[in-house]
Image (tube, helix red, strand yellow):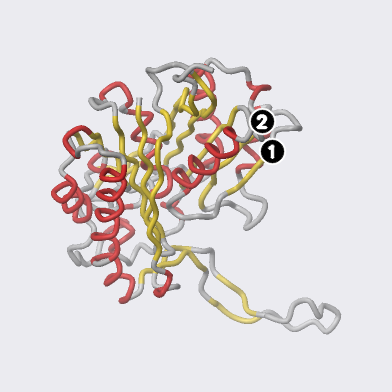
Amino acid sequence: MSKDLKVRITGKGCSYPARIRYNDDPIFKGIQDDGLFRGYKERRVLGLNESISEYMTAASFKAISDAGVPVDEIDLLIGYGSISEYSTPNILAKCHYELGLSSTCSIIPLNDEFNQLNTALHLVKSLIETGSVNTALICLGSNWTKHVDYKSSASISASDAAAALIVTKSEDTNCFYIEDYGVSVDSSDYSCMSNSPDVEGKMEEDPSQPILENTNTFSSPYFHLTEQGVNVFKQFGMNEPVKVSKEILERNNVSNTDVTLISHQASSVLMDFWGEEIQPNQYINTIANFANMTLVTVAFNFALHYDTIESDHLLLLCVGLEQKTSVILLKK
């Protein structure tokens, strides 16, 4: 077996709505600047009747074409559409149909906000190496502009987009392979950041429906950031991604000056700190023009700016709501 035959990312694609929301949009009027959410000039916004699945499907077709793989050879669709119109099934199932994937292509939705990309890469690598899967399509979509509180400073960061990657065994040394994975979790602040509905009232009780023990009525789910969530943002969110990134570089004997960094881009406050602490050779981001695409960001920037990557080592840095940060090291 060739030493170059490895689990590699062989195709990539991204897609986003045409509508742009600028900083002077009236929807942001009255929001107090708390200094946490910075760095944006534009963000992409779904139209009233648009679904994020349209963009997830478009990004997936681009990745499939880029990889040159027949659709019927894909045997795993993994990822997430957030926030899906149903709590279950995830909108990933709609993409499966729109892409024309086969009945033997399994769907695995990953509710791991905003670490879905790295979790998917980590799982897919193992599945392919053990022979359980041959070719995986990672598909991610974010429609968070419809799920934020426009009285909260966090809302100014929200942006909609989709991205997709094809992962399979390949000898193509121009494609990145998955070298290592690192993670850090602090679950002690459960609920300090969440996407959840508010209780709005009560339904009329119906004795014939004992299943309806909770008769509350709810709003649509949206992002909640508590006072403790702000503290976590400043502490875990700043420091743990740096710690995990440095550990994975040291473990693999890779210098920071030999690596390109692509990270979550919730705010330039975080990103400036990460960049200063990690000091990569190159730091690819699109925060000014695409803002915070939540779970999609890292895969999106990988796909959009793939041809500008200067290093043969690439760090993919994600941070999520558990609190959890994960880092994938890719190599050529």
Eyeballing the image, is 271 above or below 179?
below
Residue picked out by circle 2: 75
Residue drawn at x 43%, y 70% as measured from the top left: 187
- The quarter holding residue 184 reads bottom left
x, y (%) of residue 287?
A: 25, 43
- The quarter holding residue 72 reads top right
Q: Secondary structure at mark 2?
A: loop
x, y (%) of residue 200?
A: 55, 77
* Along the line of sight, the residue nearer the viewer: 325 or 50: 325
Q: What separation in Å lies between label 1 and label 2 (alpha carbons)?
A: 6 Å
Total of numbered circles in the picture?
A: 2
Using residue 278 as the reference point, say whether residue 117 is left or right of it: right
- Locate the N terminus by quadrant: top right
Name the amino acid, label 1.
Ser
Q: Pointer 1: residues within 10 angstroms few (<14), some, or many (20+)?
A: some
Q: Secondary structure at mark 1?
A: strand
Residue drawn at x 61%, y 75% as measured from the top left: 217
- Locate the C terminus by quadrant: top left
Q: Pointer 2: residues within 10 angstroms few (<14), some, or many (20+)?
A: many
Residue drawn at x 40%, y 60% as measured from the top left: 324
Label 2 near label 1: C-beta < 8 Å?
Answer: yes
Find residue 106 and name its label: 1
